[in-house]
Amino acid sequence: MALLLAAVISGCGSKEPVVHNPVTAEGGSVSVKDDNGPKIEFKETEYDFGTVMQGERLSHTFVFTNTGKSDLIISSAHASCGCTTSTPPRAPIKPGETSEIKVTFDSKTKLGPTTNVVTVSANTYPTRTLLRITADVKIP
């Protein structure tokens, strides 16, 4: 009996992985094959500021569209370095709507080639999208 109970608890018969976090705007979970979920499509995921002078603060806006079938919710956008900040939208993005994430890079403490990554977490599959900014910082 204990063996039967263990089999029922551990194997619900589904081998398909399910992402339980974050949830969709409607409160359900996001599965690998959920064609009704939100989808984030960026116009670009990398931006090169080129050669910049140390001390400059530079910004770039990454534009994206929700190409899915339900509301897109961005839960966070974290930069890999304290020299970079991001401003994601707080409101849900409806299917077909376009929005943006502004990324600002402060070159004050950098020198030479540098790459920073902003990790965008949303109720999409996959749950994370990486945005990269690069610059070659020179002494003025």
Image (cartoon, rainbow, N blue to C red):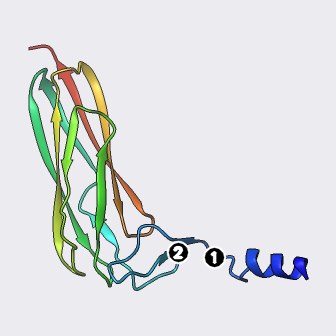
**62 vs 26: above or below:** above
Seen in the image, is 49 located left or right of residue 7?
left
Quadrant of the image containing the C terminus: top left
Label 2 Cα crowd, 10 Å radius (few <14 / some 14-19 / many 20+): few
First in sequence, mark 1 or 2: give its number.
1
Quadrant of residue 139 in the image? top left
Seen in the image, is 56 located left or right of residue 11?
left
Of all residues, the one furthest to the front in this rendering is: 2
Q: Are marks 1 and 2 in contact (CB under 8 Å)?
A: yes
Q: Element type at marker 1?
A: loop
Q: Element type at marker 2?
A: loop
Measure how far apart labels 1 and 2 are at the Cα level: 7 Å
- Residue tagged by mark 1? 16
Residue 47 spot, x, y in % from top left: 23, 45
Quadrant of residue 58 in the image? top left
Q: Which residue is rendered at x = 34% and y = 84% of the image?
A: 26
Q: Type of residue at label 2? A: Val
**17 vs 120: above or below:** below
- Residue tagged by mark 2? 32
